Structure formats: C-alpha cells, structure tokens
C-alpha cells in the first residue's frame, strides 16, 4: 500500500501536543484540517492509552470553525444531529450523512468527467475559463471539501491578464456563448 493511502498517524502526548509521525514535527488543529482538505486521512492516537481520538479532534475542528463565525452546518442540521443522539441505537443520521457525502462526491466526479470527456462545448472559446469558474464555485459550495476529490481541481486556475484573459474578455465570451446556445434552441 502506498504511503499516501495509509492514514497519517498523529500522536497526542500527555501535554496535549500533537505530533506528526511522518514529518517528525508538532502540528496544530489547523494543520490537521489542512491535511484533510488535501484529501489525506488522519488518525489521532493518544500516546499513553492508545485510544483513537480522531473523531473527537475532527469534531473540535468543526467547533472551532463554527466559533469563528464560519458556519459549517446550518442550525437545523445541528439540531437534527443532537436529536439523533437522543434516539436509542443512534438513529439513522450517521448512515444518512455518510451516504449523502458519498453521493455528493460521486456526483461531483461524474459532472467533471462529463464536462471533459463528452462535451462538444469544450471547443468553444472561453470554455476553459468557464469551467475553472464552475470548479471554483463547486469548491466554494463544498467549503473546500472538493479539493482532492476525483475529477476536481487541486487548486483553481487564475486568469492570466498577460494572455488576454481579463474579466471583460471572459464576460464577452460568456455573452457570445449564451447567444450561440440560444440560437441552438
């Protein structure tokens, strides 16, 4: 198995410091969030007891983002999560959430494949710029979760002003494309 396929092992010392076993240095919660955004699985183990603390730290990352005003989850969803913990046996919420995220990843991957493989519009001038904008939009809508998913960009390409791809040119190309599409109907 490739080193990248294995979860990144993080050890928590008694001092509560987190130690990255791959790079032999200490990391923060924000570093761990970065690993996850880069599509890297992590496993956090208490050095003394051997307990798996991964779930606890992932929840803490979400809580810290929420406390900074970055609304990760709507209040209704948070209420439903709390309610699901009150149901004997844990309810169906965990399975539902897991299935929903799997469907989101699959849909994003299929959409990216469709856009590149079977899309005759790829020949239209400005299509690459529009595709980059759509990918940036998807990344923003998923809170960066899209980065590293199959078929998604690792980073969003930036417009190159020296190459003539400034905002006005993109707007003109988009208007031309809309005009062509309306004529096809």
Image (cartoon, rainbow, N blue to C red):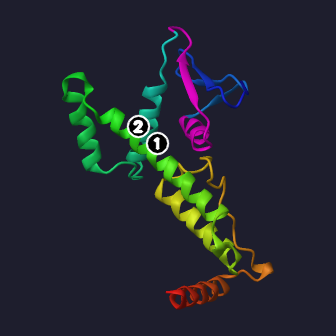
Image quadrant in which you'd find residue 59: top left
In this view, the residue in front, 176 or 69, is 176
How many C-alpha atoms fall within 10 Å of the one at disc 1: few (<14), some, or many (≥20)? Answer: few
Query: Residue 106, percent across and down?
Result: 51, 48
User: Is 42 contained in the magenta span?
Assistant: yes
How many numbered callouts?
Answer: 2
In the picture, measured across the screen, residue 78 lies left or right of residue 104, that is left
Residue at horizontal 51%, vertical 47%? Answer: 105
In this view, the residue in front, 32 or 144, is 144
Say which mark, if any, is on residue 50: none
Residue placed furthest toward the right:
162
In this view, the residue in front, 171 or 123, is 123
- Tell me the residue that label 2 is attached to: 98
Q: Indicate the secondary structure of the residue bearing disc 1.
A: helix
Magenta highlight range = 29-49
Query: Residue 52, percent across and down?
Result: 49, 18
In this view, the residue in front, 33 or 5, is 5
Residue contact at pointers 2 and 1, CB within 8 angstroms: yes
Query: Residue 38, percent across and down?
Result: 62, 43
Query: Residue 69, percent across and down?
Result: 39, 53
How many C-alpha atoms fall within 10 Å of the one at disc 2: few (<14), some, or many (≥20)? Answer: few
- Tell me the residue that label 1 is attached to: 102
Residue at horizontal 31%, vertical 51%? Answer: 74
Mark 2 and mark 1: span between their CA atoms?
6 Å
In the picture, measured across the screen, residue 98 lies left or right of residue 172, that is left
Image quadrant in which you'd find residue 85: top left
Residue at horizontal 76%, vertical 83%? Answer: 164
Residue at horizontal 28%, vertical 46%? Answer: 77
Question: In the figure, 51 relative to 89: above or below?
Answer: above
Q: Indicate the secondary structure of the residue bearing disc 2.
A: helix
User: Is 173 contained in the magenta span?
Assistant: no
Q: Quadrant of the N terminus?
A: top right
């Amino acid at each position: 198995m490739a080193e990248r396929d294995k979860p990144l092992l993080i050890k928590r010392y008694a001092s509560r410091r987190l130690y990255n076993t791959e790079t032999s240095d200490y990391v923060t919660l924000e570093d761990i969030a970065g690993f996850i955004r880069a599509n890297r699985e992590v496993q956090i183990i208490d050095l003394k007891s051997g307990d798996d603390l991964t779930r606890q730290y992932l929840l803490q990352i979400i809580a810290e983002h929420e406390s900074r005003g970055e609304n990760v989850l709507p209040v209704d969803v948070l209420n439903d999560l709390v309610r699901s913990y009150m149901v004997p046996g844990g309810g169906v919420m965990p399975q539902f959430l897991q299935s929903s995220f799997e469907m989101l990843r699959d849909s994003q991957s299929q959409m990216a494949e469709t856009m590149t493989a079977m899309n005759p519009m790829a020949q239209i001038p400005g299509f690459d710029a529009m595709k980059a904008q759509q990918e940036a939009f998807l990344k923003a809508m998923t809170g960066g979760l899209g980065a590293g998913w199959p078929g998604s960009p690792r980073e969003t390409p930036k417009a190159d002003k020296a190459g003539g791809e400034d905002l006005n040119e993109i707007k003109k190309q988009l208007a031309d494309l809309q005009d062509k599409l309306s004529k096809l109907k």
